[in-house]
Image: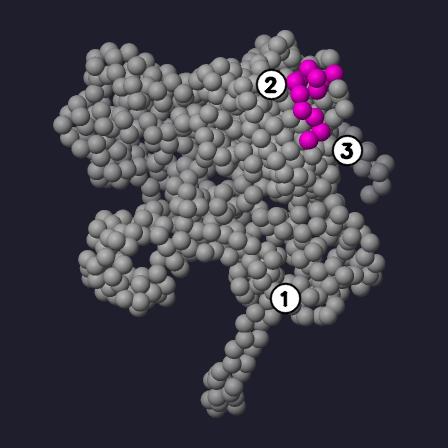
Amino acid sequence: MSSATREKSGSSRPHPADSHDWIRVHGARENNLRDISLEIPKRRLTVFTGVSGSGKSSLVFATIAAESQRMINETYSAFVQGFMPTLARPDVDVLEGLTTAIIVDQERMGSNPRSTVGTATDANAMLRILFSRLGKPHIGSQQAFSFNVASISGAGAVTVEKSGRTVKERRSFTVTGGMCPRCEGMGKVSDFDLTALYDDSKSLEEGALTIPGYTMDGWYGRIYRGCGFFDPGKPIAKFTKKQLNDLLYKEPTRIKVDGINVTFEGLIPKIQKSFLSKDREAMQPHIRAFVDRAITFQTCPECHGTRLNEGARSSKIDGISIADACAMQISDLAEWVRGLDEPSVAPLLKSLGDTLDSFVGIGLGYLALDRSAGTLSGGEAQRTKLIRHLGSSLTDVTYVFDEPTIGLHPHDIARMNDLLLQLRDKGNTVLVVEHKPEAIAIADHVVDLGPRAGTEGGKIVFEGTVEELRSSGTLTGNHFDDRASLKPSVRTSTGALEVRGADTHNLRNVDVDIPLGVLVVVTGVAGSGKSSLISGSIAPRDGVVSIDQGAIKGSRRSNPATYTGLLEPIRKAFAKANGVKPSLFSANSEGACPNCNGAGVVYSDLAMMAGVAAPCEVCDGKRFMAEVLEYKFGGKDIDEVLTMSVAQAEEFFGGGANGSSLPAAHKVLRRLADVGLGYIKIGQPLTTLSGGERQRLKLATHMGEKGDVYILDEPTSGLHLADVENLLGLLDRLVDSGKSVVVIEHHQAVMAHADWIIDLGPGAGHDGGRIVFEGTPRELVDDRSTLTGKHLAEYVGA
């Protein structure tokens, strides 16, 4: 059909297919959303904003993206769906116009210590193919260059059917892998300090084991007591050599304990499988403390940390081995790949080059492919996930981003904005949850949720353009053009923390004095060495409290009261007032409703279909046994206390009305109110909290630790413009109380509020790692010799 014919046939009325230009949401009630309805334009960039906890993620992720993924999963057969995670339909009346959703969130890239930047982005897979084709000497297929594949060989007799007869034949096989045999592809070897595993002066029955979770009352204790390989009543110091070897190293062995078939395994292989299978950064704090105390890690002396065996390291292209290539800064590796001229692998070289160029284009050119994925920050992880989508030919896809500017310097935010616009211009719908005004400014359409957080939020308070948002009168609109001004005077330091010769990662023998008794901001472009300087040189010192940006994990059973330790004094107070055990007042212990086991809901598993969760009919969702709710403290039962907001609980435990004064609980609640969480319920599941709320919950918890120096790594993550002001007030109160506060931050409002700024750069990776400025914010603005100085001067209007 010619274009003229098309125009003629389509001139009378629009084609029905062109009427689906909107994503329509009607009656959304997920989490705190209040039956909201809206229409989102397709093939446009829509930014969702509002205070932390207002319902942005509930709308974008838990409703729109979740339903898109659920409906795509339903297109597979029931057999395939049985192997996939089951997703419940969001609480919404109507969702129309959905397209395939690709979620690029802030979640860390996983705790697997074998995962690297290269393996997570397929760059390693392409490199392995490249070396298997061009490497000299040729050592085998691509798996010969994989540090996750071990070299094995074997031989034996096999039985085969031939011409109706059964014949035995000898067969042998060989697999050539690239795994270093010494460290098993981990790059590090571990050495155990046995004195940290047990007290050899005690017997097992006396509690000799000092490993977290290995108490004699628990299941592990029953196995080790009843295994029969040694006397549990004899001190470990008196064990024979064989008995001690069985305790520490015995291979998995089936035994019977109390009439139950179980597997016994030595302590060290057990610890390696349970604790060391995770990356250190992903461990729970008490597990991490045990691992740091009991296990020494050092670079593998055989592979020198490359994870690869000698064969894989010996095969080279132009004098470069795959280990050398993975250790290069990605921007340098991209140059090396472009320099290879080999027509036989031209498509592979182009694909690999494009992937590496995507790293550079997205601002991650300073990374190396052998960097452990678990060490990436939330912002770095999010951008790494974005790599695989940048060159995609897909169109009419919905990309969903969760604060893509986290961890980005103002200089890098402009680059991220360009990438978001590129995705939109290819014909995709881009949905972004964001707080930074620089990122909101590029939106085609803005949806503002609020007016406040939690139960005071969940409504659409504005829809329209950025210009209309400015005059809308909403909290976001009122604060959109807020700019912090430089302080007229700064505090004087009371001393200094000396750092000499810092050379962690890309730092170049840095010497710096970090002032004490003031608010210090450490800044610089992403990858310039900020975290390497502070986490590597300051955080390990005594008296230092470090609050990183790692997200707190939580199940339905954990809540702000359990996470902060608030529940402990409350349980004891209830127990003392009623003359009973504290464990009765825990829904995870003796006080749990027997019908739902303290969950408050009863789950019905429907195989490949989403399970149904119904409120427990016995406890009516309160999670406790009926008799527990008869015990009172200050006229309230434990369920009534846990349904209080932080502000209500602070008044209840602080005022002393009805004899409910409880200083230990009031102190924790005061800290929660200080970080702006007065509206959350102390017993609501952590799974219902937003990212910003979890970050502030973590901050409040660490503020209770004793220390003179506080390190905060990007505390503005997930905070609305209005909340940043509250954070600055909190930092001021910390400093005025005699603490020293060091903040790693990109937010210009925090920089402007600092007493002292340390700027690293000038670039990222090997182009950074140097101190490019030290001084007051005023001096930085007047100097304008660094990227940070130029952006801060523009921000404050100097």
The crowding category of the residue bearing disc 2, from other C-alpha atoms within 10 Å (few below 14, some 14 to 19, many at least 20), is: many
Residue located at (52% from left, 51% from top): 113
Q: Amino acid at mark 3?
A: Gly
Q: Which mark is residue 310?
A: 1
Q: CA distance from mark 1 to mark 3?
A: 67 Å
- Work out whether 73 lies above or below 552: below
Q: Is residue 308 visible?
A: yes
User: Is 771 situated left or right of 153 in this image?
Assistant: right
Residue picked out by circle 2: 754
What colour-coding does the image apply?
one colour
Residue located at (56% from left, 18% from top): 493
User: Is 535 situated left or right of 628 in this image?
Assistant: right
Q: Which quadrant holds residue 133?
A: bottom right
Residue picked out by circle 3: 10
At mark 2, the secondary structure is loop
Residue 374 placed where, x, y %?
54, 45
Residue located at (56% from left, 25% from top): 496
Q: Amino acid at mark 1?
A: Glu
Residue 468 placed where, x, y %?
66, 14
At mark 1, the secondary structure is helix
At mark 3, the secondary structure is helix
Residue in front for this viewpoint, 773 or 476 = 773
**Mark 1 or mark 2, earlier in chain:** 1
Asked whether 42 falls inside the magenta stretch, the response is no
